[in-house]
């Protein structure tokens, strides 16, 4: 396996890690207006992701940096083709990040409600745009012979790409609900379980439709055979379907594991359907960017490989330890009554 392929796979893993971890963050944010009955329960929901959400964002920075360094032509084409979409995405991410800090700056109910809504809107908007943007990589964008985008913002929207955005929203909301069932207790946990049940069927149908259509798009627009994309697609659909059964049986831990696998296999389906291209061009397929014509020089990839081999395991160990430390369930009483129960302690 050459270094171009190695880095394509590594970038796919980084994006998969980002969506698995940030996916439940977004899901919790989208559920903020619906699950809690008071400010104390909203505080608990935010505390379930409070110690880890910024660490999860590191996966996005790493994935973006790796794409820029390993495949600069791909990075440049994405930023030119998805420029307005990425600006909108940045807006949603910013208001979401700001909401974590500013919500607690005042006890005024309207102030707190405003920033709660900002977190929900940011989580929903970012999820929707991520789905639409990544689906366009395989569905195809108008590129010239130099790999530059020649279309408009509206070229990003089709029935398939909008379905991708809706699927990501439903899948992340389901993923967030299963996460809350393993991090909360009491009535809030029960409501998270009920929300997971309601979301599970819609998420399963959306994932099945999207992944099946992705395989068809790969065959039709990217000159791919049905195998290997069909393999992660089937596994992804099976994981989400199994999550439905586990949610109904109240097997919270396993249900969360299955939604995480569903997200991971969905990303794997996209990247498997894309390879050996990194960005499909339409209507002129010959202008598509590939792992060969979009990659950096061999020396650059070799140096990056050494750096990744040293630091990536350290990052994984550190983040794993963070999740271990903040693994304890949080009580679903109002924050003013919960006292030290809302403060995660090492080894709790």
Image (cartoon, rainbow, N blue to C red):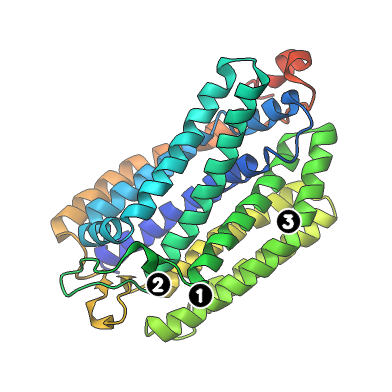
Q: Name the element at disc 1.
A: helix
Residue 56 seen in the current view: yes
Q: CA distance from mark 2 to mark 1?
A: 8 Å
Callout 2 secondary element: helix
Q: Sequence order check: which comes first, mark 2 or mark 1?
A: 2
**Of callouts 3 and 1, which one flags the residue occurring earlier in the amino acid sequence?**
3
Residue, x 58% and y 61% (percent of image)? Answer: 166
Q: Position of residue 316 (x, y in %)?
A: 45, 41
Closer-to-camera residue (326/157)? 157
Residue ID for mark 3: 199
User: Element type at marker 3?
Assistant: helix
Q: Quadrant of residue 76?
A: bottom left
Q: Is residue 121 above or below residue 73?
A: above
Q: Disc number at residue 14?
A: none
Residue 29, percent across and down?
A: 61, 40
Left or right: residue 91 compared with residue 51 = left
- Left or right relative to 234: residue 63: left
Residue 117 position in % (x across, y down): 61, 35
Whether residue 326 is visible to the viewer of this picture, yes or no, is no
Location of mark 2 (residue): 138
Picture residue at 37% right of the left edge, 85% below the top? 223
């Amino acid at each position: 396996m050459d270094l171009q392929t190695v880095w394509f796979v590594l970038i796919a893993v980084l994006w998969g890690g980002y969506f698995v971890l940030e996916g439940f963050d977004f899901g919790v944010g989208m559920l903020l207006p619906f699950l809690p009955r008071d400010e104390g329960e909203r505080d608990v929901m935010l505390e379930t992701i409070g110690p880890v959400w910024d660490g999860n964002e590191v996966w996005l920075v790493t994935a973006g940096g790796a794409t820029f360094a390993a495949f600069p032509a791909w990075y440049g084409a994405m930023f030119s083709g998805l420029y307005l979409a990425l600006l909108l995405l940045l807006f949603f991410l910013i208001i979401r990040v700001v909401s974590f800090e500013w919500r607690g700056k005042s006890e005024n109910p309207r102030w707190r409600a405003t920033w709660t809504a900002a977190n929900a809107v940011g989580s929903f908007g970012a999820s929707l745009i991520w789905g639409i943007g990544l689906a366009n990589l395989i569905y195809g964008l108008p590129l010239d012979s130099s790999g530059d985008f020649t279309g408009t913002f509206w070229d990003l929207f089709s029935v398939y790409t909008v379905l991708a955005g809706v699927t990501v929203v439903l899948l992340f909301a389901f993923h967030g609900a299963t996460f809350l069932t393993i991090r909360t207790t009491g009535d809030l946990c029960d409501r998270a379980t009920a929300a997971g049940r309601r979301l599970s069927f819609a998420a399963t149908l959306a994932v099945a439709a999207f992944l099946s259509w992705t395989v068809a798009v790969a065959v039709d627009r990217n000159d791919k055979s049905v195998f290997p994309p069909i393999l992660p697609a089937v596994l992804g659909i099976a994981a989400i379907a199994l999550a439905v059964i586990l949610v109904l049986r109240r097997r919270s831990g396993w249900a969360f594991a299955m939604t995480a696998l569903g997200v991971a296999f969905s990303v794997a389906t996209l990247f498997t359907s894309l390879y050996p291209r990194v960005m499909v061009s339409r209507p002129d397929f010959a202008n598509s960017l590939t792992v060969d014509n979009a990659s950096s020089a061999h020396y650059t990839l070799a140096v990056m490989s050494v750096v990744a081999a040293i630091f990536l395991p350290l990052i994984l160990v550190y983040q794993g330890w963070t999740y271990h430390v903040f693994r304890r369930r949080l009580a679903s009483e109002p924050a003013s009554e919960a006292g030290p129960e809302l403060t995660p302690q090492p080894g709790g």
